[in-house]
Image (spheres, coloured by chain):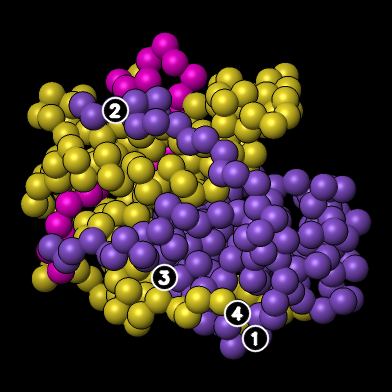
Chain colours: A purple, B yellow
Amino acid sequence: MPEALSDATLARLFREARTHNAIGGEVDEATLRTLYDLVKFGPTEANSCPGRFVFVRSAEAKAKLAPALSEGNRDKTLAAPVTVIIGHDLAFYDKLPVLFPHTDARSWFADSDEARLERVGLRGSSMQAAYLILAARSLGLDTGPMSGFDNDKVDAAFFAGTSVRSNILVNLGRGDASVLYPRSPRLSFDEAARIE
Amino acid sequence: MPEALSDATLARLFREARTHNAIGGEVDEATLRTLYDLVKFGPTEANSCPGRFVFVRSAEAKAKLAPALSEGNRDKTLAAPVTVIIGHDLAFYDKLPVLFPHTDARSWFADSDEARLERVGLRGSSMQAAYLILAARSLGLDTGPMSGFDNDKVDAAFFAGTSVRSNILVNLGRGDASVLYPRSPRLSFDEAARIE
């Protein structure tokens, strides 16, 4: 079995990584494409890859996003060089003949009610959001993930006429560590886990 | 900004990592505790940390899990040294006075209906499952995540009398790369993403 990654890498990815509020810097298109080309490999149910990603970067697109943001998230999001909208396509099953070609996986989902599709989609896009956070850290970017926004407004502004539903926003860029609050506590192993 | 991690590390975490079916080897308790102590730092909504983890390792616990597994997942799961049940506690908000101490975050969720709690819990435990997959790879373990099981049976066997609901299973150990199928396709950037 390979050895564990170095302590410096584990610190960057997990132990010392932080959710940043003040994010500046620049993120070019090549970096966003490299980022996606890491995220896409993370596993999802039946390789359904339900996540859909809008990299909001232009002033026009930021202005479309602004009315959907909660007040506490607005200024920092408008200041970040890129905000990723991560949603999921409720019609993700239409890609399964390509994504899961060795059997008819489309039929496992195509006749499902919207509640099941939303559950599978939400699970998958949440996993892909987590992959994106860790992939961004792997590339040297800081992240600021958020759930505090009006999903219906984001869907109307960015996904109108589609079967995509927004889930999570993530600001990307260079965080200003000097304005971080102390890290909040986490649950101990015994509070959150057990071995049977 | 720090440089990107090495190509070898990006390959291990993303580009060449695979979901394994045949998983053997041994995983000791210290490794499971180290694993949790990476996973716990991944961000969740309002630091709610809704994920709960049962590391199923003994023959007795595997026998409790077996009837809940789909036929295609049963043998490989019983053969894996550890199977992690990842669920979420619908009463996650009871920990918020500790986890999010600077304001009364408990009140944001405590009067919510079960549908909202399930949505927040599912989102968070799915993100934490993704952190676990990448943390395991960081430690040199291979993973086999699965959704193909009977949630009600797992909940009855492992979470009876609690507000925890199962979400995802992950086999952990050493994968046998010689029996892997070729990797399934992924969506291109332009199929899953856009820059605005």
Q: Which residues are magenta?
A: B157-177
Which chain does the numbered disc 1 sit on? A
Which chain does the numbered disc 2 sit on? A
Residue A6, quarter of the rendered image: bottom left
Mark positioned earlier in the residue sequence (2 or 1): 1
Q: Which residue is mark 4?
A: A32
Query: What's the CA distance linking mark 4 and mark 1?
Result: 5 Å
At a point 82% along the width and 47% down the height, the residue shown is A72
At a point 72% along the width and 71% down the height, the residue shown is A24
Q: Is residue B9 visible?
A: yes
- Residue type highlighted by circle 2: Arg
The quadrant of the image that shows the N terminus of chain B is bottom right
Query: What's the CA distance linking mark 3 and mark 2?
Result: 29 Å
> Which secondary structure, mark 2?
strand
Q: Are marks 3 and 2 on the same chain?
A: yes
Mark positioned earlier in the residue sequence (2 or 4): 4
Q: Determine contact: label 3, label 1, CB under 8 Å.
A: no
- Residue type highlighted by circle 3: Phe
Q: Which residue is mark 1?
A: A29
B28 and A105: which is toward the camera: B28
Q: Which residue is mark 2?
A: A194
Relative to A108, A3 lies left or right: left
> Which secondary structure, mark 1?
helix
Query: What's the CA distance linking mark 4 and mark 3?
Result: 15 Å
Which chain does the numbered disc 4 sit on? A
The numbered disc on residue A41 is 3
Q: Determine contact: label 3, label 2, CB under 8 Å.
A: no
Query: What's the CA distance linking mark 3 and mark 1?
Result: 19 Å
> Which secondary structure, mark 4?
helix
Is the residue A24 above or below the residue B7 in the image? above
